Amino acid sequence: MISNQTTAYESRRLQALHSYHILNTPKETIYDEITKVTSKITGKPVALISFVDKDYTWYKASTGYDNEKDERAHSFCSHAIAEKKKFLIVENALLDSRFSSFPSVIGDIEVRFYAGVCLIDEQGFPLGTLCVYDFKPNHISDEHLEFLKVTSRQIIKILTLNKLNTQLSWNQAQVEKRNALLRDFAGIVSHDIKMPLSNIILTTEVLRSKYFDKLDFKALEYLSYLKESAFRLSDYINDLLTHYESDHNSNDNLEKFELNQLLDEIVELLKINDDVTIHFPETSMDLYVNRAALEQIFLNLIGNSLKYNDKDHIEIEIKAGEGDTYYYFSVTDNGIGISEEKQDKIFDLFKTAVDKDRTGNTGNGIGLNTVKNLVESLGGTITLSSKIGTGTSFHFSLKKQSQK
């Protein structure tokens, strides 16, 4: 009866077994190959990887045996998992009262010999067995029994890795779902907050123009603070929107363009003053990448070089090159630099290197995280080198894509 084959911790054992989601799943080559090797090495015609469920013993892989499952009440493996020594050897099932009436023994299959070693998970629960059958009375050598034990441990490692991969895939799906919700929320924020902010900015300008001669200096200063704060909040929202859209900038939107032309357009957008010199690469390059993503990367890096700089004259140098599989870029400035203890965290979301920029404003710590997301989505990496008071260099690569 089944009650004679259950473990003392059966409910927890079954819970552990079900956590692997292995029952009644399709055959897999990696397990089939294990049974083939096991049969070959032990010299037994049948080798099985079994999992003992509540009512059935399921065979994940088999060599020399056609059944996909057997009733647990008539399963050698069910007895094996209840053994304290965690393995079971039956040299002649016909002479063993526990098994002599099994259908597999007295029926057409005529199993006589069985040797099974438990598959013990990391919690110590026997999930099933790696076992071998023979159709005649037989025995198993110590060396072959040790082989079964070693191989059973390898099966558990495979099961554990598959379980972790399944969990990671589920976690990734949950993260993607959450990010989708955040992007939707960001869109709502863009629509519902940016318009009132624009109205605030416009209203402050109207008040300043219409009542300029009726307001004292302090009131005008408050209006300036209000306008400045609205602009900063608007910039913050724009940065958040860019951040949550950054993982959508992929290699699906590829364009062919000239690097220095892109840099010219960026400099024009940034409205560079006379106290800034930007050195472009001496020789321009033809690129084939996501142009919008690369533009956003350079806008952030060059913008940071401008904002976080305490020199009378700002110097920024941009270099570019290419290898067989990657484009390489660098942006170097003579700015305030980043301390060593903050360099490891500078690409984290909402992390900043300094409290105030060149104009006294506080950064939001979104830009460099966005840059990192963009670079990695384009198959590249980004690093930095920096020295306080001297400047910072950002080095990044983008993977080349085949032109259609």
Image: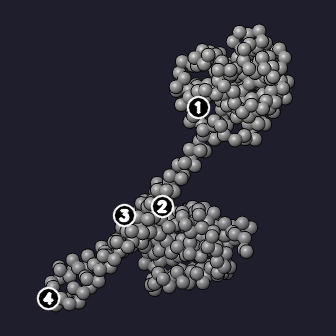
Q: For marks 1 and 3, give the one nearer the viewer.
A: 1
Q: Is mark 4 on a helix, strand or loop?
A: helix
Q: Where is residue 4 in the image (x, y as percent from the top left)?
A: 60, 15
Label 2 neighbour load within 10 Å: few <14, some 14-19, many 20+ = some
- Residue positioned 69% across, 27% down in the render: 70
> Marks 3 and 4: CB-CB under 8 Å?
no
Task: Tell me the quadrant of the picture where the C terminus can be found.
Answer: bottom right
* Amino acid tagged 2: Ala
Res. 17 mark: 1
Res. 180 mark: 2
Q: Position of residue 272 (x, y in %)?
A: 47, 83
Residue 118: tell me if it is visible.
Answer: no
Q: What element carries label 1?
A: helix
Residue 324: tell me if it is visible.
Answer: yes
Near-viewer residue (392 or 125): 125
> Marks 4 and 2: CB-CB under 8 Å?
no
Sequence order check, earlier mark of 3 and 4: 4
Provide the residue designation for mark 4. Answer: 214
In three-dimensional space, the C-alpha distance between marks 1 and 4, rounded to whole angstroms, equals 80 Å
* Amino acid tagged 4: Lys
Provide the residue designation for mark 3. Answer: 355
Label 1 neighbour load within 10 Å: few <14, some 14-19, many 20+ = many
Q: What element carries label 3?
A: loop
In three-dimensional space, the C-alpha distance between marks 2 and 3, rounded to whole angstroms, equals 31 Å
Sequence order check, earlier mark of 2 and 1: 1
